[in-house]
Every structure is written in C-alpha cells, then in structure tokens.
Amino acid sequence: MPYAIDLFCGAGGCSEGLIQSGFHILFSSDISDMVEVTYKYRHAQLGLIQGQNTWFERADIRNLHGDFINQKISELEIFRNKDVPEIDLMIGGPSCQGFSRAGRRDKEDPRNLLFGEYVRVISEVKPKYIVLENVEGFMDMQFLGYKGLNLYDEEGNLVEEGPVYPDGSVTPNILTAELNRIGYSTLEPRILNAADYGVPQRRNRVIFIGYRNNLPAPSYPEPTVEAGHHLSLRDAIGDLVNNANIRNRVNQRLSDYQRDSRAGRTPSFVTGQPIPCDRRHLQNLELPNATDVVLERFDLFNQGESGSMLRKRIKEQGIDITGKNALIQHCCEKLNMQADEVVNLFRNVNAPNDAIDILLTKKNIRQRLDSTEPSPTVVTLPDDYINPWEARTISVREMARCQSFDDSFEFLGKRTTGGLKRRVEVPQCTQVGNAVPPLLAKAVADEIMRVL
C-alpha cells in the first residue's frame, strides 16, 4: 500500500481523497486544536488509530522537522520490528489568506512564506511525489527579497546558501526553483475546477505537482465530468430539504451523488468498505437562529438572485410583500407608515432607495442559490447563502455535501464564530470552507497512484 503524509491537513478533505485513492496516511499535521478534534475523530472512525497505524501532530509547520516526522512514523505499532517504508506522496495546502483574490491581499502576511516551510519539510523527508494545493491568487503573488532554503548535508554542515530571488518573483517560479535545488522536477501548475471531477461546486484551485528526479512524471487528472454536465445543487442537497412537501416535489428520487454520499466513499482501514451514514442521526444540520424579519427577507429572493439583483428588480418592477407581516411591521416602524402604505410603496416601481435599504438592509452580497447550477465556492462564512427552496441559510451538512464529504463525516466543535475570534478559531463552517474537496483530491491522488 502506498504511504502518504498530509500537512496543513485541516479537517481532512485531502486525506479523504487520498484514502479513497488507496493511500495509507502515516502522518498528518495542522496548527488548529479545533480541526484536530474533527480529524482524529474521523480517522478513528475509519480505523486509523493514533500511535498504532497513523500519527497526527498539532504543530506550527515552522516547528515541524523531518527527523520528528520520521521518528513518529517509525514508532507506529504497525512498523514494530519492520523497516520503515519510503513516503510515496506528501500533500499540503499552506495557509492561503495572503494569496486570496477574495478581499485584501497582503504581501507582508507571514502565512505567505509557509510554502517555503513546506519545501523545507520536503527536503528533510524526501517523499517520492509532492502535491501543493492553493487558491488562484497563488499564481501571481509577488515577493520582495524572498530568500530560498539553506541546504545542509547529513551532518548538518551548510552546503549551499539560499539564493535571494529578484523582487517581483512570483510564487510558482520560486517554488519550482526551490524544488529543483533539492532534487525535484515539477509540472507546470494548473488551475483545476472541482466541478470537473464530480464535485457539485464551482471551485478553482491551483494544483502544483513535483516528483523526485529519478521517478516517472505524473500527469494532471483529466476531467471526469463533461462540460455542461456538472452536478447541480439539486443533485447534491435536494434530499436535505426540511419541509417534506417541498422535498418530495424537488427531489422525487435520490441522485447517484446523494446515494454515494449516504453510502460513503471513503473505505475503512479495518473492513475495506465505506462507512454508511445512519440517517436517523445525520449530524451538522443545525441552523443559526434567525428572526421572522430575516426569514421573510430571505423569502423575497428568487433562485440565483443576489442582493443587488433583487434591489434592481424591486426598483424596476416592484414587489408584493403581502403576508410578510414581520417585515411589513419592521418597515412601518422605520418609515412611520401604515401597513397598507408600506405594501403599496414596494408594489409600485421606483421605491425610494432609503426605503429599499430598510426592506433589504444595505447588504448586497447575500445570494439565493440556484438549484439547477453547481454551488458557488463554499466559503467559511456561509450565512449569506440562502437555500434554493427554503427561506433559510445552509447547514454545515449541506456545505459538506457541496464539498463531496461523506454524510458519515462529522464536523465537531462550534458551528461558527465571529468577530476577532475568526482569526484564531476554526469552527465547523471554517473547517468545511477551508477543505480541499475530497473528490478533487482523489482525482489528483489517482494520477500519483498510477505512476507509482
């Protein structure tokens, strides 16, 4: 069985894909204590037991070294009185906030340099193949005065000082040069869309593959889903609608994807068979508390409509809010009007902007998802996504379905967090939103498995 290491593993999206592809994960690591709980729980469920046949280390990669990783692997019970095998694949997704194109990009963000630490660990462990996953912004992030890795011999003597790269060097070029210095060839990085590999989500990710110079080159995976035939949200989460009448109407039969999610895709280390989900105890369905005003506001959106699109429709066509009693009362209080006056105000075209602000709030990023399309990129704060069929946000389980996690995969800890805690906490929503879709990871891992 091929052996793998998963660094920056998060809750375990990459690990799920690797296991589905046939890899045995001997060592994994992440800095968060909150993802550690989820990751260990899932791996114990799969028969990957800490200290027996796998090891998870909660650590900052800057403090993680090859000697320690090799030691922990050699101490596993499965290798007692046996030679420790080579690592076939190391995979990792260094923290990407500084690379992200969604929001402010910070060239000084120290997390941008974590890919260099990843290269250092590669040089110390020397796996046969390496994969790095990141956001699209990874492709064009520039650095000023980036210093490469110092190289040492086995006795710890400095052999080569790390070069200082020209100002403006972009991340892929630095990474390619650094891997070449430590004996690895690379493929040109490629942007893969998860929807092309059976994931019901439009999610572009940069995949960067390297391999030791003496080994055959792998390839990037070819799409498994034809263009125009991507899975839709109905395919993914139609069976998770709460209202039975709506569910029976929109999801008259289970899709293949829904059946696979229920039956499981990731095999148990013990039985070799996936772990099905007990439908009576499906986890991660909790929703945030919302007022009647908020829920009625959600109900104003058509499928596929954003806040700005809804605002434009109200302005140009008017909208009938009859029956939205909490929302009408809210507008009455704010506009100092009677209920029939409020209804007429919005039913007519060209309602005043300040009145529309009260009806909708000034927030325009809210969006009702389109059931006929794949999900947009699953994010760590999903409360601005409205369920296609019901006036509510989406649950962590629905997010996980859009990411291609099995239903038996349970995310632990608090559902979400806010304020300054977002900088340090990794609750369920963040665990799902940060994850690599397992089916995308499997597609990449299958190509490594092929050349192995």
Image (cartoon, rainbow, N blue to C red):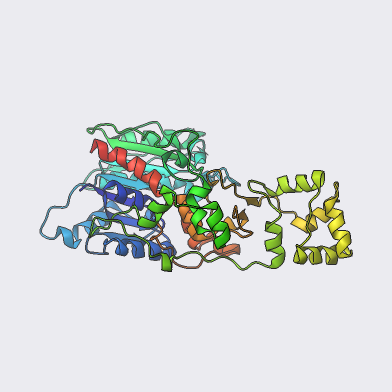
Compared across the picture, whether 422 is left or right of 412 comes to: right
Q: Position of residue 400 (x, y in %)?
A: 46, 55
Q: Position of residue 206 (x, y in %)?
A: 45, 39
Compared across the picture, whether 273 is left or right of 208 comes to: left
Query: Quarter-wise, where is residue 341 in the image?
Result: bottom right
Asked if residue 8 can be seen in this view, the reply is no
Q: Residue at x 32, y 53 (%)?
A: 266
Q: Residue at x 23, y 54 (%)?
A: 70
Instruction: Tell me the quarter of the image containing the C terminus.
Output: top left
Which is more toward the observer, 169 or 44? 44
Which is more toward the observer, 208 or 248? 248
Q: Position of residue 51 (x, y in %)?
A: 24, 64
Which is more toward the observer, 172 or 443? 443
Compared across the picture, whether 273 is left or right of 277 comes to: left
Q: Residue at x 53, y 47 (%)?
A: 375
Q: Residue at x 48, y 64 (%)?
A: 284
Asked if residue 75 can be seen in this view, the reply is yes
Query: Quarter-wise, where is residue 279 in the image?
Result: bottom left
Q: Position of residue 342 (x, y in %)?
A: 85, 59
